[in-house]
Amino acid sequence: MSLKNKLHVLKEKYKSTKFAPAFNALHTFLYLPNETTHGGTHVKAADDLKRTMNTVIMAMIPCLIFGMFNAGYQHNLAVGDIQAVSSGFFSSEFWTLANFTVGFWKILPLVIVSYGVGLGIEFLFAIIKKHEVEEGYLVTGMLVPLIVPIDIPLWMLAVAVAFGVVIGKEVFGGTGMNILNPALTIRAFLFFAYPTWMSGDKVWVEGAVERTNEIAAGANLDAISGETILGSLAQGKEFAYSTADMFLGFIPGSVGETSTLLILLGGLFLIFTKIGSWRIMLSSALGAIVMGLIFNQVVDAGVIGEGSKFYGLMNTPFWHHLLIGGFAFGTVFMATDPVTASQTNKGKWIYGFLIGLISILIRVFNPAYPEGVMLAILLMNVFAPTIDHYVVQGNVKKRMKRLKAKVA
């Protein structure tokens, strides 16, 4: 008997028990459902929730693989085992087994913990509440390892995932009912509960925290610094990364957020498959550009001088804001979440523009956390229903005016 038939037998055997959702979820995760619609009242299409989630995961896979190479590259570069890449994206100094091995063994546990804890809680709630296990966490489980620092302790990640799934999703009713993006809820929990592990100049390069602790204990070692570009600019420092490094991703940062090129390609793939909203992506970029231009004009006008603690980020060329930090990744993969984003076309323009605007605003004026896309998206998640409400009401009023004019 094949594995598919065995699982089907088990599903039928336990379909009247409380464990039915678990067996059904395992069966539908591995295989297509046996049941299909035949009546004329249904819309027949090849896509379903599982395929939609898998499409988003495929768009993130290049960022995951690149993140593994970059994690090892940043580590080996910091300890002096290799030199900085000099021949661009196809550099032989970057795409090496030594870099991949370091990154693979650091990132794989993050992925395992994210999916293990998250799906475990999903199954538990399905059994307790006697409903089907939904595929919504498939994307969240991949997002979480890509938006955290490389050296985040696994137990912290497990606690944060449990909080994000329970408080950010299940209490609202599960997939499709949550008002906040679950992955960003997890990251927000980490930031507020364990701030020293989510910011600073040591958490972004593998081994930097461990080396710092050894030095503090009296070991005669050189310190490893893994400060991000945003961290340097927030402290008024100059950064030694070229535009090409920032665009391609040869910089410290969260696992999947460094390569703007691969994020852009993933965004185009989501637009092509009609899963990601191009309106939200484009309007977010426009909002960030507008805010960056405003800050640049303020500096050019002499309102803010070099002595100000905000000068570094305010003086950053407006288009650099699109290449550094987590702005690109958040815009493509999290602002476009169809559950928590605006649903109307006009609402998507407003929603995305405000995300871009607020992201750069927080990035510049929050010296404790020189990044803003996470907080901006969560804030706009809350206001998305309000935006849609006023867009719909505005359309209703316009139609009523046209009707009255026609009647008159």
Image (cartoon, grey):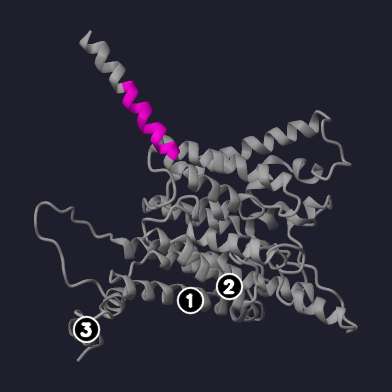
CA gap, disc 2 and disc 1: 9 Å
**First of labels 2, 1 by sequence position:** 1
Callout 1: SS? helix
The count of marks equals 3
Q: Position of residue 2 (x, y in %)?
A: 22, 88
CA gap, disc 1 and disc 3: 24 Å
**Residue 365, quarter of picture:** top right
Mark 2 touching mark 1, by CB under 8 A? yes
Mark 3 touching mark 2, by CB under 8 A? no
Query: Which residue is identified by label 1?
Result: 117
Q: Magenta residues?
A: 386-398
Kind of residue sitting beneath label 2: Leu
* Front position in the image: 376 or 330: 376
Single out the residue that lies furthest toward the left. 39
Single out the residue that lies furthest toward the top. 408
In magenta stretch: residue 72: no
Query: Which residue is identified by label 3?
Result: 14
Residue 157 — which label?
Answer: 2
Would you say the magenta stretch is mainly helix, strand or loop?
helix
Callout 2: SS? helix
CA gap, disc 3 and disc 2: 33 Å
- Few, some or many C-alpha atoms within 10 Å of disc 3 (few <14, some 14-19, many ≥20)? some
Q: Is residue 234 left or right of residue 221?
A: left
Kind of residue sitting beneath label 1: Val
Mark 1 touching mark 3, by CB under 8 A? no
Kind of residue sitting beneath label 3: Tyr
Look at the image and tell me in which quarter the C terminus lies: top left
